[in-house]
Image (cartoon, helix red, strand yellow):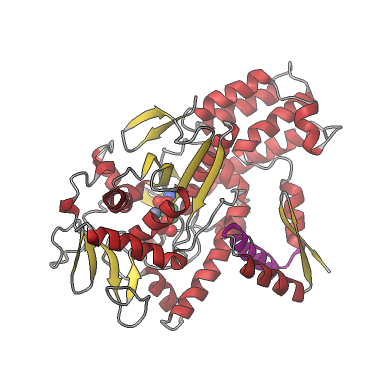
Amino acid sequence: MLQFQNTLTGKKEEFKPIKTGAVGMYHCGPTVYDYAHIGNLRAYVFADILRRVCELADLKVTQVINITDFGHLSDDADAGEDKMTKGLKREGKPLTLEAMRELADKYTKAYVENLKQMNIKLPTVMPLASEHIKEDVELIKTLEEKGFVYKTSDGLYFDTSKDANYGALSKKMVTAREAEGAQTRIGANLEKRNQRDFAVWKFNQNIGFQSPWGQGFPGWHIECSAMSMKYLGNTFDIHTGGIDHIPVHHNNEIAQSECATGQPLAHYWIHSAHIIINSEKMSKSLGNIFTLQTLIDQGIEPLAYRYWLLGAHYSTQMNLTIDSLKAAQTGYKKLLNIFAELGENPKGGENIKDENKPDEKYLNKFKEFVFDDLDTPKGLALIWDLTKDTTVDDATKRTTMLAFDSVLGLDFENFTKTKQNQQEIPRNIIDLMNLREIARKNKDWRRSDELRDEIFKLGYQIKDTEQGPSVKKI
Ligand code: AMP
Ligand code: ZN
């Protein structure tokens, strides 16, 4: 039985999919105005584990991670500068839509590369907020027709007092501390009817998209509502994000979606905890961030960071120290070596499962742990128990470790191979390949072909395989 801690009810609940044998999940994606920090990446490792666990439970997964390339203000609510504008200023770029797109492109590529470095499977769809303005406008129109929005001098706002259920998520929050003062950060805007009202569209005379209400940008919350419902339906199974999203972003998504459709947005809301450093949340605004590259520069491999993350439950706050990461890397390397010493399976490759079954007792135990709200710490402890168990032969151990790895994603089998391969391909080619993969995920075949041609002109040929695209020098 699969079960998850549901923020909406405050309880651990059995997972009952809307459609038998399938699951639809939406994860709030990055705002691509800068490199992701490793705290951000925890949210996506968590999403990846969730997806892999659902796959182990034989569910067909439709997974959506959006790319927020417009519309996210520095404050999660309506105050503060637009994050993309901030990024443009930081990089000395002009304030134009074109420059914004370039900025978004640069950091989207870097994000996809980070996902791959962390062995996070690419989602089924990665919609760009900028390509869903039409859907945002439609949703806002519905809310307007139903009387949920009003206009002020700087935008169109959702009237939270009209939604009797507003704040559904926070009501069930275990401690008020988790709100982390997000509500109080909302600057006092005297034109708002209620201070917790939020913008669904913000006017901007200089730059932005056209809308029936004036030029500007959609609100960050409406973007997620529009994209999640477009790809997963008005009601879908699971919605996730970091705990900072609970008080504002997710409450607002729920309010506007449910008032527009009259149906629940998602049945299960699951939230991952933060990475902190010296008792402070890792965040760009506090200037205490580590990127994956910072770790690599300190000799820590991305997958050692993944191993470190899996050592704690996703809902546990983790304090980052380089020493603890180094210790995790030592453990991870030891595990890789143990795996390597178990020898190549004589049948190899895809036959492994048929020819050599995983140890049933261990696999069942593993499932019991990870199906219970993704208990990866117990899953990791079990893999160590397995390595020490002299009653299990090497070939079975190997197959069982690979079965566990379908969830843990520590890449026992391919890690070294993939890394060597990637090092031979120049950075710009990998970047273009990553962009092409997003285009393919989004079924944008024209863009995908353009990118293939561009890669070809640079002297590399792409081959699409079942395991994903591979590239070689012509
Ligand atoms: P953002 O790009 O700011 O929208 O954040 C992307 C994801 O990272 C969200 O799910 C956040 O909740 C999450 N996040 C932000 N800071 C941290 C942190 N220090 N630790 C863990 N997750 C974080
Ligand atoms: Zn979102």
Specify the quadrant that holds the C terminus: bottom right
Q: Is residue 94 above or below residue 135?
A: below
Q: Nearer the viewer, residue 318 or 366?
A: 366
Can residue 433 be found in the magenta stretch?
yes
In the image, the segment drawn in magenta is: 425-442
Q: Is residue 14 above or below residue 146?
A: above
- The residue positioned 44% from the left and 30% from the top of the image is 16
The answer to whether 471 appears left or right of 332 in the picture is: right
- The residue positioned 44% from the left and 84% from the top of the image is 94
The answer to whether 300 appears left or right of 198 in the picture is: right
Q: Is residue 101 above or below residue 468?
A: below
Q: Nearer the viewer, residue 89 or 190?
A: 190
- Residue 238 can be seen in this image: yes
Labels in figure, total: 0
Coordinates of residue 236 in the picture (x, y in percent):
42, 43
For this orientation, the residue located farthest to the top is: 391
Task: Give the quadrant of residue 431.
Answer: bottom right
The answer to whether 277 appears left or right of 441 in the picture is: left
- Residue 186 can be seen in this image: no
Coordinates of residue 204 in the picture (x, y in percent):
30, 77
Can residue 11 be found in the magenta stretch?
no
- The residue positioned 64% from the left and 37% from the top of the image is 406
Task: Give the quadrant of residue 211.
Answer: bottom left
For this orientation, the residue located farthest to the right is: 346
Q: Is residue 166 above or below residue 105?
A: above
Does the magenta stretch mainly form a helix, a strand or a loop?
Answer: helix
Coordinates of residue 178 in the picture (x, y in percent):
30, 44
Coordinates of residue 457 in the picture (x, y in percent):
75, 76
- The residue positioned 33% from the left and 42% from the top of the image is 264
